[in-house]
Protein backbone atom coordinates (compact mmCIF):
# COMPACT_ATOMS: atom_id res chain seq x y z
CA UNK A 1 0.00 0.00 0.00
CA UNK A 2 1.34 3.43 -0.94
CA UNK A 3 2.12 6.29 1.38
CA UNK A 4 -0.49 8.98 1.90
CA UNK A 5 0.39 12.61 1.32
CA UNK A 6 0.29 13.16 5.07
CA UNK A 7 3.25 10.80 5.44
CA UNK A 8 5.47 13.34 3.69
CA UNK A 9 4.89 16.00 6.35
CA UNK A 10 5.75 16.30 10.03
CA UNK A 11 3.31 15.49 12.81
CA UNK A 12 3.20 19.18 13.69
CA UNK A 13 2.33 20.13 10.10
CA UNK A 14 -0.42 17.50 9.95
CA UNK A 15 -1.79 18.51 13.36
CA UNK A 16 -1.91 22.19 12.39
CA UNK A 17 -3.57 21.34 9.07
CA UNK A 18 -6.25 19.38 10.96
CA UNK A 19 -6.88 22.35 13.25
CA UNK A 20 -7.16 24.75 10.33
CA UNK A 21 -9.47 22.38 8.47
CA UNK A 22 -11.77 22.20 11.50
CA UNK A 23 -11.77 25.99 11.73
CA UNK A 24 -12.41 26.52 8.00
CA UNK A 25 -16.14 27.21 8.29
CA UNK A 26 -17.56 30.62 9.20
CA UNK A 27 -19.98 29.09 11.72
CA UNK A 28 -17.06 27.48 13.56
CA UNK A 29 -15.17 30.77 13.58
CA UNK A 30 -18.32 32.40 15.00
CA UNK A 31 -18.50 29.75 17.72
CA UNK A 32 -14.84 30.30 18.64
CA UNK A 33 -15.34 34.08 18.70
CA UNK A 34 -18.40 33.69 20.90
CA UNK A 35 -16.53 31.45 23.33
CA UNK A 36 -13.74 34.05 23.43
CA UNK A 37 -16.25 36.78 24.31
CA UNK A 38 -17.70 35.08 27.39
CA UNK A 39 -16.04 34.41 30.72
CA UNK A 40 -17.47 30.96 31.38
CA UNK A 41 -18.40 27.73 29.70
CA UNK A 42 -21.51 27.97 27.59
CA UNK A 43 -24.30 25.42 27.34
CA UNK A 44 -27.40 26.32 25.32
CA UNK A 45 -26.52 29.93 24.55
CA UNK A 46 -24.50 29.08 21.44
CA UNK A 47 -27.60 28.13 19.44
CA UNK A 48 -29.27 31.46 20.20
CA UNK A 49 -26.15 33.32 18.99
CA UNK A 50 -26.03 31.78 15.52
CA UNK A 51 -28.52 31.89 12.62
CA UNK A 52 -28.45 28.09 12.40
CA UNK A 53 -30.65 25.24 13.55
CA UNK A 54 -29.71 23.41 16.74
CA UNK A 55 -28.64 20.18 14.95
CA UNK A 56 -26.34 22.20 12.66
CA UNK A 57 -24.74 23.98 15.62
CA UNK A 58 -24.30 20.62 17.33
CA UNK A 59 -22.49 19.25 14.28
CA UNK A 60 -20.14 22.25 14.22
CA UNK A 61 -19.48 21.85 17.95
CA UNK A 62 -18.72 18.18 17.37
CA UNK A 63 -16.17 19.01 14.65
CA UNK A 64 -14.46 21.60 16.87
CA UNK A 65 -14.42 19.15 19.77
CA UNK A 66 -13.04 16.29 17.65
CA UNK A 67 -10.24 18.59 16.48
CA UNK A 68 -9.41 19.46 20.09
CA UNK A 69 -10.22 23.16 19.73
CA UNK A 70 -13.00 23.11 22.31
CA UNK A 71 -13.88 20.83 25.17
CA UNK A 72 -17.22 19.97 26.63
CA UNK A 73 -18.12 19.16 30.21
CA UNK A 74 -21.38 17.49 31.12
CA UNK A 75 -23.37 19.51 33.64
CA UNK A 76 -26.68 17.84 34.40
CA UNK A 77 -28.45 17.28 31.10
CA UNK A 78 -26.38 19.86 29.20
CA UNK A 79 -22.87 19.97 27.81
CA UNK A 80 -20.99 23.18 28.55
CA UNK A 81 -18.32 24.19 26.06
CA UNK A 82 -15.14 26.22 26.37
CA UNK A 83 -11.94 26.64 24.40
CA UNK A 84 -9.19 24.10 25.02
CA UNK A 85 -6.26 26.11 26.37
CA UNK A 86 -3.54 23.76 25.08
CA UNK A 87 -4.77 24.06 21.50
CA UNK A 88 -5.12 27.83 21.67
CA UNK A 89 -1.56 28.01 23.03
CA UNK A 90 -0.34 25.90 20.10
CA UNK A 91 -2.06 28.23 17.61
CA UNK A 92 -0.71 31.28 19.43
CA UNK A 93 2.82 29.87 19.19
CA UNK A 94 2.44 29.12 15.48
CA UNK A 95 1.11 32.56 14.58
CA UNK A 96 3.60 34.20 16.95
CA UNK A 97 6.45 32.65 14.98
CA UNK A 98 4.97 34.01 11.77
CA UNK A 99 4.54 37.46 13.30
CA UNK A 100 8.13 37.51 14.58
CA UNK A 101 9.44 36.50 11.17
CA UNK A 102 7.43 39.22 9.44
CA UNK A 103 8.70 41.87 11.87
CA UNK A 104 12.34 40.85 11.47
CA UNK A 105 12.45 40.58 7.66
CA UNK A 106 11.32 42.70 4.82
CA UNK A 107 10.80 41.36 1.31
Image (tube, grey):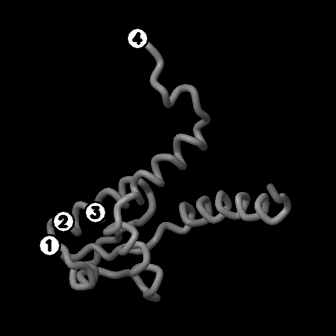
Residue that numbered label 4 is attached to: 1
Relative placement, left or right, of 80 versus 38 is left
Secondary structure of the residue carrying tag 2 is helix
Q: Please tell me which of labels 4 and 3 falls first in the chain.
A: 4
User: Label 2 near label 4: C-beta < 8 Å?
Assistant: no
Distance from disc 4 to disc 2, alpha carbons, whole Å, reads: 37 Å
Q: Earlier in the sequence, mark 4 or mark 2?
A: 4
Residue position for label 2: 56
Toward the viewer: 73 or 10? 10
Mark sitting earlier along the chain (1/3): 1
Camera-nearest residue between 52 and 72? 52
Q: Mark 1 points at which residue?
A: 53
Q: Please, is residue 9 above or below residue 16 in the view?
A: above
From the viewer's perspective, is residue 37 above or below residue 16? below
The answer to whether residue 104 is left or right of residue 4 is right
Tell whether label 2 touches label 3 (CB within 8 Å): yes
Mark 4–mark 3 CB contact (< 8 Å): no
Measure how far apart labels 3 and 2 are at the Cα level. 6 Å
Query: Residue 60, labelled with which disc?
Result: 3
The answer for how far apart the CA atoms under marks 2 and 1 are is: 5 Å
What's the residue at 40%, 69% (across, down)? 29
Residue 50 at what x, y percent from top left?
25, 79
Q: Where is residue 107 in the image (x, y as percent from the top left)?
A: 80, 55
* Mark count: 4
Amino acid sequence: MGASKADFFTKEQNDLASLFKAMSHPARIAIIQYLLSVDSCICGDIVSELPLAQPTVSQHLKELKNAGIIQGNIEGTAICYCLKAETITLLEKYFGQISEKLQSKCC
